[in-house]
Amino acid sequence: MDKAESIAHFQEHVVWQERANVQLVLERDFQSQRERLADEFMTSFQEICREIRDAQVRGEKGAIGYITYSMLRTELLEGRYIYRVEAMDNGWVFDRHPYVLQYEAGWAFQHLDTLRSRMMTASRMYGGRVSVPVIERMLLTEAIAIHRYVIALARAALPQAVELEQYRDIVKEPEFEIRVGEYMDLSEAVFKQYECERDSASIRAWLEDREGAAYAYESYRNMDLQNGDYGENHFQFSVFNQCDLSRASLQDSVLIGTKWHDTALAGTDFSRSQVHGGEFRGCDLRGAVFRGAAGADGWKDDLFLRYPGLSALRFAGSDLAGADFSGASLHGADFSAANVVDTLFEGADLTNAVFSRRQREALRLDPQQWEQILWKT
């Protein structure tokens, strides 16, 4: 093989496999240490907010419209796993004087060291045709797979972090976002806050326009959206707080990583929707329909490779009386803190789904499903 062929072979047969191995370990560590990592993120966020507020008190910074965490590729090769944190006004990237801080992400990027070591070792088989500069360029590309876990951690930690006094003390613009991405490149919203009231009627009309992915990464609060037809839309990683979507249609929608808190969803139709990593907390889901919905956790069919760091589908404190999960994929879903009286699971995959023993009398499962489920201790 010549040099170009060697590099292509190395990329296909070494890098792909080693990346998958590293992601497997990172996913396992992330899921098992999620609470500790979230606590550490909150501690860092608390200090970041304190410094931003101090800068505002000193008159160095006005109201904040964005806090952005940016991966710095140039730092990675030097072994410095830091994110540039910028507090910016409502001009976002056009803010000429952002207040700059740092976030340490060594917990994630230590796995880049592992990947580098394995790639260096494997490159010896190519007789010098896969050089160190080539490997370093590849590593900068592979860093994205690890970066996605920083995004996942921010999503997991921020719902609690924004309750901190230090965050509330910051003077913010009426529309405020926290974003995670690459420096001077793409980023995505991991938290949004609207101080001004948004009109339910206009939001309803917007959702019914079916603009696809326009509704993702959004925050919907105190919205009356009942009886609406919002099917086939993409709401991934959006948050619904104290909304009413009773009897609405969300058929065939992308609802990956969505959070539904204290929201009325009685009779709502989620048929065939993707609800991987969804959290329904304190929701009224009586008679809701999840027929054929896909809600497996990341371990099913290696979904974590596409959706890293997702938690299991959860229904804590929610009322699922009479809800219909017929034919749904619910691998690893957690029903242990929900009301499951008269809930239908006919033909559903409940492998490793979690229930509490107090629910035993209410459950109506077939013999295979009884073998599939786990009991919360």
Image: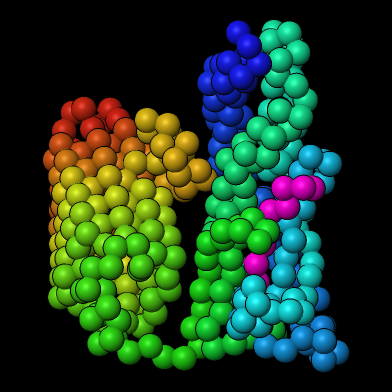
372 part of magenta stretch: no
Instruction: Give me the residue at 61% from left, 19% from top.
Output: 4
Total count of labels: 0
Q: Relative to the observer, which residue lies in front, 309 or 343?
A: 309
Q: Position of residue 184 (x, y in %)?
A: 66, 61
Q: Is residue 20 left or right of residue 295?
A: right
Can residue 214 be seen from the camera position used here?
Answer: yes
Above or below for 150 versus 1: below
Indicate whether 38 appears above or below 295: below
Q: Nearer the viewer, residue 150 or 213?
A: 213
- Above or below for 250 versus 67: above
Colour mode? rainbow
Residue depicted at 73% across the width and 65% down the height:
85
**Residue 366, image x, y percentages:** 16, 33
**Which of the 4 quarters of the picture holds residue 333?**
top left
**Measured along the vertical axis of the image, is residue 112 above or below residue 269?**
above
Relative to residue 250, is residue 170 drawn left or right?
right
Q: Position of residue 258 (x, y in %)?
A: 39, 60
Q: Position of residue 122 (x, y in %)?
A: 69, 14
Q: Quadrant of the N terminus?
A: top right
Q: Is residue 337 visible?
A: no
Residue at image coords 44%, 40%: 306
Q: Is residue 109 left or right of residue 330?
A: right
* For residue 281, side relative to residue 350 (left or right): right
Q: Nearer the viewer, residue 374 or 239?
A: 239
Highlighted range, magenta = 67-75
Q: Give me the residue at 74% from left, 61% from top.
A: 84
